[in-house]
Amino acid sequence: MTQILILGGGPAGGAVALGMKALGYEVTLVTEARPFDAVEGISDRVIQGLRHAGFRKGLSCLPQPSARSAHWNGEANSANTESLIERKKLDAGILQDLEAAGVHVIRQRVRQVQGLVALNDKSSVSVQVMLDNGESLSADFMVEARGRAAPQADFARSRGPQTLSLLQYWHSDNGAESVSQRRSMAISLPDGWAWMAMLEDGRRYLQLTVDVSAAELPVKQQLAKYCQQRFLAIPEAKAFTGNAKPVGVPHGRISTPVLVEENIGSNWIRVGDAAMAVDPLSGNGIFQALSSALQAPAVINTLIRQPADAELAARFYRDRVEGLFYRFARIGRDFYQLEERWQGAPFWQNRCQWPDAEPVHKTVRFDQLSVEMMPVVADGLIAEQEVVITPDQPLGIWHLAGIPLAPVVNQAKQLANRQAFDAWFADQQNCHSVGIQNPAQLN
Ligand code: FAD
């Protein structure tokens, strides 16, 4: 039986593991615990994605959504909510889900990978993976899902402005304060933005995001003092800092948007943040990591069971990862443009223009619709089907609300009443495309 080896047990690695198990493969996953207990805010859409991926234990640790306020461009908005997740708990739940599904989970650090083969190389080579404990694993196919920690240096990449997030917990000795209510806040600053979360047990999680080159970051030994001063200087942060004090030293997390352009070979694939990582401002990181991970099993299945369609499967995967990356990048750019007070400052200037000036969505006219053969996921494999192409959906729409769209468009093209169809199509597209979110959903 074909052996699938997955490196990294976050949402992306976990989703691929469950997907490959469902297709009947033997799956081993190697992962180590993340070095810092990060807190993240997730929307209902991410929770749906985690549920769709098949995580049950992972979801059982999620608290109820709590209030989220946003202070952006001098305006305050507190209409939204988000669930504050402790990543170590989510990751532990994901591993329990995998073990319950029969995935062999090894809790170890991966040290080295060998034997990755390019897509056009037809030789049958096993991937060799060396672990920190000296053990060596061999597999027919490897899934790289080590998030941003996955090696990138040898791969062609596109990167956005270099960004760093500094994270730290704050605690209070004051008993009265420790029963504080769970909540979060995002706020724009002249040289970046901050996100703060108050957990149920009174711990506060403070995250400061700045431009690596523009920020006047101090040396490592003075970073704790720098972060403390920065948060104490934000009047709106008082509701989070209160009488609390920072604990330990800040942890740095690179948050530069990055797309690894070469993301698939004949015996390997990159998924989740290892394939593309977006700006944490969008609060969509887990969602986009799941997006590639949920498509990967059909792509891998095609490479293994129908190698004649390898190029088709690779095109399907590359185009989707790239399309999603730029869509999220443009959504992020539009968020940054909503902050008008510091557009001349390096942090804002860099991000208001990247990646380009293309709109997130393009208006579509009826005469721009075409029907073409494009790769889609069908019965666990990548196959060509007739889809509808539009300037806004260049990868094509196969089904809309469960109905194959190409026959409808072909018929409509023959109808005289094109105006009516135009209105119908615009309406359908509004319902099904990723929209620009409310700035109050920032994190
Ligand atoms: P990861 O979740 O990173 O999982 C990778 C796994 O591989 C980890 O368990 C890691 O320990 C393991 N690993 C790494 N190296 C090795 C190794 N050598 N050997 C073995 N195991 C290894 N997303 C949101 O949805 N909401 C947010 O609020 C949010 N905030 C963020 C804030 C910051 C500062 C950053 C940087 C990101 C944020 N994200 C957020 C994004 C989110 O964290 C990622 O998009 C998501 O976790 C990616 O999932 P993944 O499975 O691809 O990778």
Image: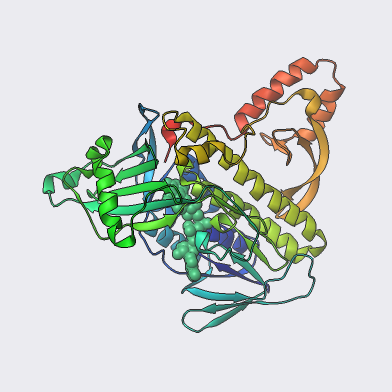
Above/below status of 52 relative to 102: above
Q: Within the image, what quadrant is residue 70 found in?
A: top left
Q: Position of residue 316 (x, y in %)?
A: 73, 51
User: Looking at the image, which residue sits at the far bottom?
Assistant: 134
Q: Within the image, what quadrant is residue 428 found in?
A: top right
Q: Position of residue 245 (x, y in %)?
A: 19, 51
Give the quarter of the figure containing the N terminus.
Answer: bottom right
Q: Along the horizontal axis of the image, is 16 left or right of 412?
A: left
Q: Is residue 355 visible?
A: yes
**Residue at 30%, 56% in the rendered image:** 223
Q: Along the horizontal axis of the image, is 321 left or right of 86?
A: right
Could you say which is closer to the camera, residue 412 or residue 181? 181
Q: Position of residue 287 (x, y in %)?
A: 52, 47
Q: Is residue 100 visible?
A: no
Q: Position of residue 138 (x, y in %)?
A: 62, 79
Q: How many badges with numbers are in the image?
A: 0
**Residue at 79%, 64% in the rendered image:** 307
Q: Along the horizontal axis of the image, is 308 left or right of 300?
A: right
Could you say which is closer to the camera, residue 10 or residue 400? 10
Could you say which is closer to the camera, residue 292 or residue 321? 321
User: Looking at the image, which residue sits at the far right?
Assistant: 414
Q: Along the horizontal axis of the image, is 434 left or right of 370?
A: left
Give the quarter of the figure containing the C terminus.
Answer: top left
Could you say which is closer to the camera, residue 215 or residue 147? 215
**Colour scheme in the image?**
rainbow
Above/below status of 118 relative to 408: below
